[in-house]
Amino acid sequence: HPAFPLGTPVLARGRPGGGPRRPGRHRNGRHASQPQLSVMRWHLLITPPLPGADNMALDEALLERAGATGEAVCRVYSWSRPTLSLGRNQTAAGHYDLALGRELGVDIVRRPTGGRAVLHHREITYAVAAPAPETGSLRESYAAVNRLLHDALARLGAAVRDAEPAGRAPVPS
């Protein structure tokens, strides 16, 4: 599961919706100092299992760093204990029982990205923090990151295939 779409890329500040071309920009809309994802400087960060709050704090810090430096980081990590992560804009009040979560040994945190609740347990997660492009949609950014990961895994010999879109899952009751 990605914590930031690749399943969830963590994209840094920018204008994901794009907009009209502005003076001083290249024809493709990007500023000269803002390379494409495939040609920008990337870092790989592998971290040990951490509690959910620490994982989300690190993702936030990497997001801010990407915005400040223009560099991208692909972080690979896991969780030291079961954790329910809620999407950035997901309504939580009245929907989740924090006391029951504590009783069951499940931490509850909020991700810096959207989507619905995801239970993390015994898995490998990745997050991508990269400067957001000045043009194109967030979906296009996610697709670009997914292509990079797909190609990298295939070059390592992994049998990689694109999943078929499953549609939107029903809202849990």
Image: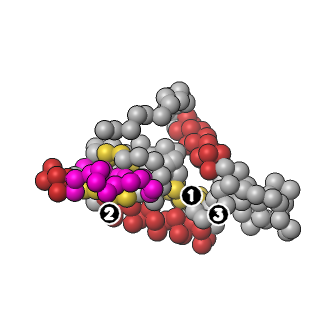
For mark 2, does the 10 Å Cα neighbourhood hold few (<14), some (14 to 19), or many (20 or more) residues?
Answer: some
Residue named by callout 2: 53
Q: In the picture, residue 48 is in which quadrant? A: bottom left
Asked if the stretch drawn in magenta spans residue 69, the answer is no
**Which residue is label 3 attached to?**
14
Q: Amino acid at mark 1?
A: Leu
Q: Is residue 158 or residue 129 the one in the foreground?
A: 129
Pointer 1 or 2: first along the chain = 1
**CA–CA distance in space, label 3 to label 1:** 8 Å
Q: Is there CB contact under 8 Å for labels 3 and 1?
A: yes
**Residue extending furthest front?**
94
Task: Look at mark 1 in the image and give the residue it sits on.
Answer: 11
Secondary structure under the numbered disc 2 in the rendered image: helix
User: Label 2 sits on what residue type?
Assistant: Ala
Report which quarter residue 151 is drawn in: top right
Magenta range: 79-98
Q: Position of residue 86 (x, y in %)?
A: 37, 53
Give the distance between the C-alpha atoms of the residues marked 1 and 2, in whole angstroms: 19 Å
* Of residues 110 and 46, the one drawn nearer to the viewer in this rendering: 110
Which residue: 72% across, 63% down?
34
Q: Residue furthest bottom?
A: 68
Q: Position of residue 114 (x, y in %)?
A: 48, 52
Q: Amino acid at mark 3?
A: Gly
Residue occupying image coordinates x 67% and y 61%: 15
